[in-house]
Amino acid sequence: MPEETVPTDTTPAPAPAPAGSRSPSSVFGTLGCGCAALVVVPVLALVALLAWVFSGSADIPRAAPEEMADRAFQRSQEAYDVMGFDRTVKPGVEDIGVSTENTLGSDYCYDGGLLGLEDKTVDGAYRMSHRWALDHVPASRAVSGLRRLHRQLKDEGWEVTSYREGGKSRSWDLYVQRDDGAERMSFTWYPDRAYFTGGASVPCAHDPAWRNGDIGPAGDDQRPPALGPAQRT
């Protein structure tokens, strides 16, 4: 019986790939992963941006206008005490920029939108502020009081964004803030007319009683108590 033979494959074996080169499958796999990354990364960035934009309004606390009005007034009262003023200022104002003043105000809170380019109000959110002013304030009281207030607020952790000692003809100014500007105070003395002004604004809050259709910012009907020297015993 003739001997069986095994067929021999005469096809030459493929040459080994040069060092450092990659097979077609690995190249296409890498390209596939890269394309996927190019799609996923912008999507994740968009999600992060949306979360950052809308977190601002979500973080606004709920508080009644009476509570935030009192907070703004107390900021002014504390500064008034540090300045050492001993007059009592009744609520209201007769002539803005001339007479004494003791008033509360309310404004809308705004949302910049997806790209921060819009100017939309946040439903039910408001920001309370308090303004006060004194006429006939001499330099002997204003200068020492403002310097003392400047030191006091720095010691309490307020960020001084501007402070200017204006001299005899230019105004003296002090501007402070904290919590990234959510809470602010400002003070100015005009030596040419011996007029001193102060103001405080507190962070935005959601009015728990707000309903769809309400007109105007919450708190616009608030009235402050008399502003005067601290009761010393």
Image (tube, rainbow, N blue to C red):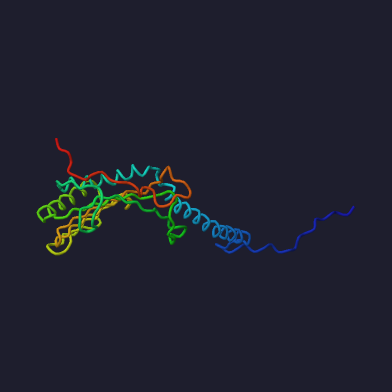
| Residue 16: percent from left, percent from top | 62, 62
Q: Hey, which residue is sitting farthest right in the picture?
A: 1
| Residue 47: percent from left, percent from top | 50, 53
What residue is shown at x 15% (from left), y 37% (from top)? 232
| Residue 50: percent from left, percent from top | 48, 54
Q: Is residue 152 above or below residue 171?
A: above
Tell me the quadrant of the picture where the C terminus can be found: top left
Pick the front one: 59 or 109: 109
What residue is shown at x 16% (from left), y 48% (from top)? 83
What residue is shown at x 12% (from left), y 62% (from top)? 168
Pick the front one: 48 or 86: 86
What residue is shown at x 40% (from left), y 52% (from top)? 216
Q: Is residue 202 left or right of residue 80?
A: right
Q: Is residue 57 left or right of residue 77?
A: right
- Tally the marks: 0
Q: Quadrant of residue 53?
A: bottom left
Pick the front one: 222 or 57: 222
Q: Is residue 94 above or below residue 65?
A: below
Q: Hey, which residue is sitting farthest top in the picture?
A: 233
